[in-house]
């Protein structure tokens, strides 16, 4: 009998023009062979937008599709879908695998975003109200991030016209030019930030699975921990899937082929029973 498989995906961003997922049915091939599915944040955008009806439709479509087509599904919240569930993290394989979206790694949530300054101030203010701000448990830190994320309005994500979306996307993402450097800095620092946070709050975790920054990769840290980012379904980057079994963690690329998402090459396979080893970095 084959071992049970928990499959982790993230950052579908369903309902947004930049997402390659125009129809949820495109995801069906990715569900084969999974006994449990984990959607690790930013499945869609549930934040306040100009068209609340459209957001509600997307939310209902997501709930219906995964209920009818997927095995047991755990929705972990991200900064775009802070109210999608009450789950902000997940521990698997006897706490050896820690899954969380990844915005918790940054004190201003999205350091390259237009709302970073306001988000950082709000997060700092909420932390300062706590009895012991310097020693907050990870559960409380995640909750604070979700409170702040929930109230940040959609920007280009709410635009339904494709041409206006492109203009607003470019304005929100690459202008002014220094924003590109902030994105690169987030990509560069994410692995070390993830390992440091795990050492403090989830010391048993040897594998940290995140999304958020949209850059797919695998990074081995000096302490032996492996940080895995599952990328994104939004252009121009690419996604990956993580399969967790009783004895192993496998990372596979996801490709869009014949209008469906399918598995491509294996990016890494790692035993759970031994210290994590493997490629230092595997990019998009």
Image (tube, helix red, strand yellow):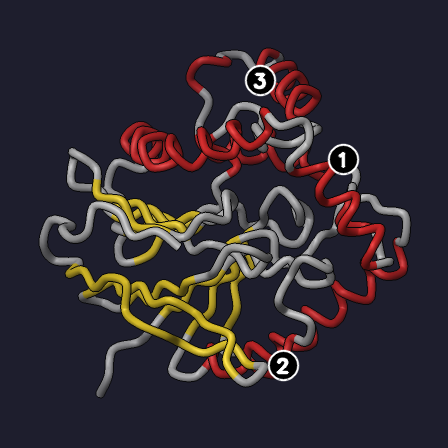
Judge depth for marks 2 and 1 and give the one in front.
2
Q: Which mark is residue 127?
A: 3
**Label 1 CA crowd tier, 10 Å (few <14, some 14–19, many 20+):** some
Q: Spatial distance from mark 2 to mark 3, Cα to Cα?
A: 41 Å
Residue 216 position, x and y percent, is: 41, 52
Nearer to us in this view, 189 or 45: 189
Which structural element holds mark 2? helix
**Label 3 CA crowd tier, 10 Å (few <14, some 14–19, many 20+):** some
Residue at 82% over, 61% down: 56
Q: Earlier in the sequence, mark 2 or mark 1?
A: 2
Q: Which mark is residue 95?
A: none
Residue at 40% over, 55% down: 284
Which structural element holds mark 3? helix
Residue 236 position, x and y percent, is: 55, 55
Q: Earlier in the sequence, mark 1 or mark 3?
A: 3
From the viewer's perspective, is residue 151 above or below residue 10?
above
Judge depth for marks 2 and 3 and give the one in front.
2
Please state if 211 lies on the left or on the right of 221 as rendered. right
Which structural element holds mark 1? helix
Q: Earlier in the sequence, mark 2 or mark 3?
A: 2
Residue position for label 2: 25
Q: Spatial distance from mark 1 to mark 3, Cα to Cα?
A: 17 Å
Residue 57 position, x and y percent, is: 82, 66
Residue at 16% over, 34% down: 222
Tell me whether the residue at label 2 lies in contact with that at label 3, contact meaning CB atoms closer than 8 angstroms: no
Q: Which mark is residue 151?
A: 1
From the viewer's perspective, is residue 279 above or below residue 172?
below
| Res 1 → quadrant | bottom left
Q: Spatial distance from mark 2 to mark 1, Cα to Cα?
A: 30 Å
Nearer to us in this view, 221 or 234: 234
| Res 192 → quadrant | top left
């Amino acid at each position: 009998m084959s071992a049970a498989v928990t499959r982790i995906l993230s950052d579908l961003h369903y309902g947004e023009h930049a997402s390659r997922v125009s129809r949820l049915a495109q995801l069906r091939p990715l569900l084969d062979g999974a006994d449990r599915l984990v959607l690790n944040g930013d499945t869609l955008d549930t934040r306040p937008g100009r068209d609340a009806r459209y957001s509600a439709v997307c939310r209902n479509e997501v709930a219906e599709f995964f209920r009818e087509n997927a095995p047991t599904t755990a929705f972990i919240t991200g900064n775009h879908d802070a109210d999608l569930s009450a789950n902000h993290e997940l521990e698997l394989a006897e706490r050896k695998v820690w899954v969380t979206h990844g915005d918790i790694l940054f004190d201003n949530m999205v350091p390259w975003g237009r709302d970073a300054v306001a988000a950082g101030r709000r997060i700092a203010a909420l932390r300062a109200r706590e009895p012991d701000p310097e020693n907050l448990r990870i559960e409380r830190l995640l909750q604070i991030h979700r409170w702040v994320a929930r109230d940040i309005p959609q920007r280009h994500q709410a635009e339904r016209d494709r041409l206006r979306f492109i203009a607003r996307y470019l304005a929100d993402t690459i202008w002014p030019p220094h924003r590109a450097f902030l994105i690169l800095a987030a990509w560069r620092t994410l692995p070390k930030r993830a390992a440091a946070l795990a050492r403090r709050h989830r010391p048993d975790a040897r594998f940290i699975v995140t999304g958020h920054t949209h850059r797919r990769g695998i990074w081995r840290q000096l302490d032996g921990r492996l940080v895995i980012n599952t990328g994104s379904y939004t252009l121009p980057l690419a996604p990956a899937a993580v399969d967790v079994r009783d004895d192993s963690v496998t990372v596979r690329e996801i490709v869009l082929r014949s209008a469906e998402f399918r598995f491509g090459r294996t990016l890494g396979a790692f035993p759970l029973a031994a210290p994590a080893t493997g490629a230092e970095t595997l990019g998009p």
